[in-house]
Image (cartoon, grey):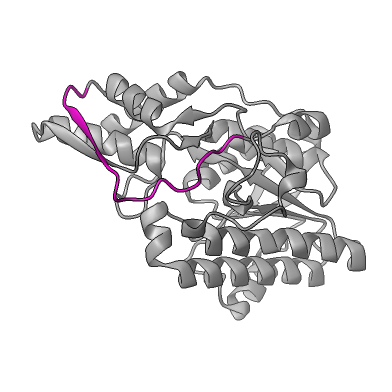
Amino acid sequence: MLEFFKNKRITVTGGSGFLGSHLVNKLKGHGCKDIFVPTIENYDLIKMEDVRRMYKDASPDIVIHLAAVVGGIGANRENPGKFFYDNLIMGAQLMETARLNGVKKFVALGTICCYPKFTSVPFKEEKLWDGYPEETNAPYGLAKKMLLVQSQAYRQQYGFNSIFLMPVNLYGPGDNFNPNSSHVIPALIKKCIDAMKNDEKEIVVWGTGKATREFLYVEDAAEGIILATEKYNKSDPVNLGAGFEISIKDLVELIVKLTGFKGKIVWDVTKPDGQPRRCLDTSKAYKEFGFKAKTGFEEGLKRTIKWYKEKFLL
């Protein structure tokens, strides 16, 4: 792997974000010395002139496209138009300009939200088109899914080498803990720790707790992307996950235990659960490029809680 990355110029969109910062660190560890991270201050990737300028400045061999406008259920419900347009236009322009600039490989990151709302568990890549995504995040999921359509069409017409990976919900140190846009794990960790800090006796959690989710530790996800970048060269979509599911109820109880919160859990059943179940079939990633998640869920949560406390409570 060190040989593969040694002399490559790699551009990582979203490289200063949660997943991106872990990926950039791992790329450096794998011998990559020429990594370009476009920041939003210098390159607004929704504007075509900025996309063209980024390719001119970076001259990449490989583009790993992680940048996205994302959020939890609340943020998706408030911004469906923005989440659709920004993600669609950013991905389409980046891949088209990569093709025109002779980029050797384009790695597109999709999302588990691409899957239909009612997909048989575990989710297999072949089921991706068997229905409409869950309503609260469908605009985001479909915008990302268009990268797969573009990837396959470009391989067919232009012989362009692009791949499409679908990670499950990520978590870990460096996650987004902003309550207006965070996903379930950082939101719950913050709720529990804030309640203890403020001597509150209860926390309120959205939904019924019956929905299930799967979570992938961010460093495992970064390793999976690196393996796929080196070894995978087909346009068939590939899941990146840990291959387990946990109910939101059990997740809340586990985070309550690990944070030490002793109060009451109040379920706000007027709020949506989101997709009923989520669990990926991860066999294809292992078969195609040898990826298997290594970090145990409880261990990953402990590291995330420790990071949050050190970052925000000192």
Q: Give the side of residue 210 with respect to residue 156, left or right.
A: left
Q: Position of residue 117 (x, y in %)?
A: 57, 50
| Residue 270 covered by magenta stretch | yes
Q: Give the side of residue 84 with respect to residue 130, left or right.
A: left
Q: Residue at x 62, y 34 (%)?
A: 241
Q: Nearer the viewer, residue 147 or 64?
A: 147
Q: Position of residue 119 (x, y in %)?
A: 64, 44
> What segment carries the magenta color?
261-279
Q: Residue at x 79, y 40 (%)?
A: 230
Reply above or below: 36 against 213. below
Q: Nearer the viewer, residue 252 or 17?
A: 252
**Residue 43 in view (yes/no):** no
Q: Give the side of residue 200 with respect to residue 57, left or right.
A: left
* Quadrant (top left/top right/bottom left/bottom right) for the C terminus: top left
Q: Position of residue 285 (x, y in %)?
A: 75, 34
Reply above or below: 265 against 116. above
Main SS, magenta region, reads: loop
